[in-house]
Amino acid sequence: MQLDDMRIFVATVDARNFTAAANRLSLSKQFVSRRVMALEEALGVQLLIRNTRKLAVTELGQEFYERARRILGEVEDAEQAMSLRRAGPRGLLRVSAPMSFGMMHLSPLVAAFLREHNEVRFDMELSDRTVDVVGEGFDMAIRIGTLADSTLIAQKLVDVRMVVCCSPGYLRRRGKPKVPADLERHDCLLYGHGGAVSWDFVIDGAVKGVEVHGPLRANNGDLIRDSAVAGLGIVRLPDFIVARTIQEGLLVPVLDAFLPSAATVYAVYPQHRQSSVTIRAFVGFLRERMSKGLAPA
């Protein structure tokens, strides 16, 4: 099995099309198709399901794709480390980030980084789901708040203030919560996926989680914020998502005296990518730019 065949296969899966992969690699469609077939023969398994419109990846093909991406990433890291001529950041960086944070803060920084490093390419996924960084072949992810235990390396980028707030109309109808325990009788708009949701507060000098419930759950902060503006309930969101609506009087902070000082934004990446020149450069760039603060959108 040749390393170039692995690269061709990864490009083909990314493009879901032999022609598009061939164009990306500056090869002929026939050559790309032959090399993928040779790879399947060498492995003794079917990697792709071919039809006239597009390609589908088999279960074994997906597993091989994820492993191949990691291997190619390690090869690229080794090439960067060994080549003085190419000591700077280069190559493809596949990054996952939360939707609102990505649009408001990461997007302009990616553009600025690319202007400084023209040998780097980004493949960005903006989504509020928690991706499997290693299993899905990401090089890096941006996470906000408490990190789950994992083998990922976490680098702190910046602290963000969390805000609990609701609309003036909701306060008139339901009254203002004075202590975190009052949230038991309020409608809370929940950010995240299934399962119980708790919000952290400082109670009797210690940070404690208060379980909250409500009529709406979503994995997008903008949707939750807009629902709070519409008077549906109380939200707990990063300052950069709600700052403008608070300035405009559309939302009113509550329980400020009980909130922890901040949540942390992290860059996380697999251990096998810690030697990557490109990841180190991008994380350092983000930390330096974000140290100046996050402006509300």
Image (cartoon, helix red, strand yellow):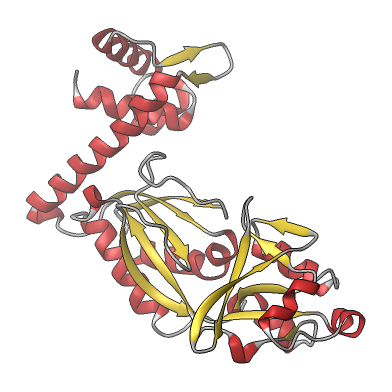
Q: Quadrant of residue 3?
A: top left
Look at the picture and state if 239 lies above or below 71. below
Q: Which quadrant, please, contains the N terminus? A: top left
**Residue 146 vertical position relative to residue 259 in the rendered view, above or below:** above
Left or right? Give the position of 137 relative to 258. left
Q: Can you give x and y, in whole percent of width and height, for residue 35 in the image?
A: 30, 15
Seen at 22% across and 54% down, the residue is 276
Along the viewing direction, whichever of 242 and 215 lies nearer the viewer: 215
Measuring from the top left, give residue 281's x and y in whole percent. 26, 65
Relative to 283, 160 lies left or right: right
Q: How many callouts does the rendering have? A: 0
- Percent x, y for residue 259? 57, 84
Q: Can you say which quadrant of the picture contains the C terminus?
A: bottom right
Left/right of residue 33 with respect to residue 296 in the rendered view: left
Position of 95 relative to 203 (above/below) = above
Question: Which picture quadrant has residue 251?
Answer: bottom right
- Residue drawn at (48%, 83%) of the image: 206
Q: Which residue is rendered at x = 37% and y = 51% of the image? A: 121
x, y (%) of residue 196? Answer: 63, 57
The answer to which image quadrant residue 58 occupies is top left
Residue 65 relative to residue 296: left or right: left
Q: Residue furthest front?
A: 204
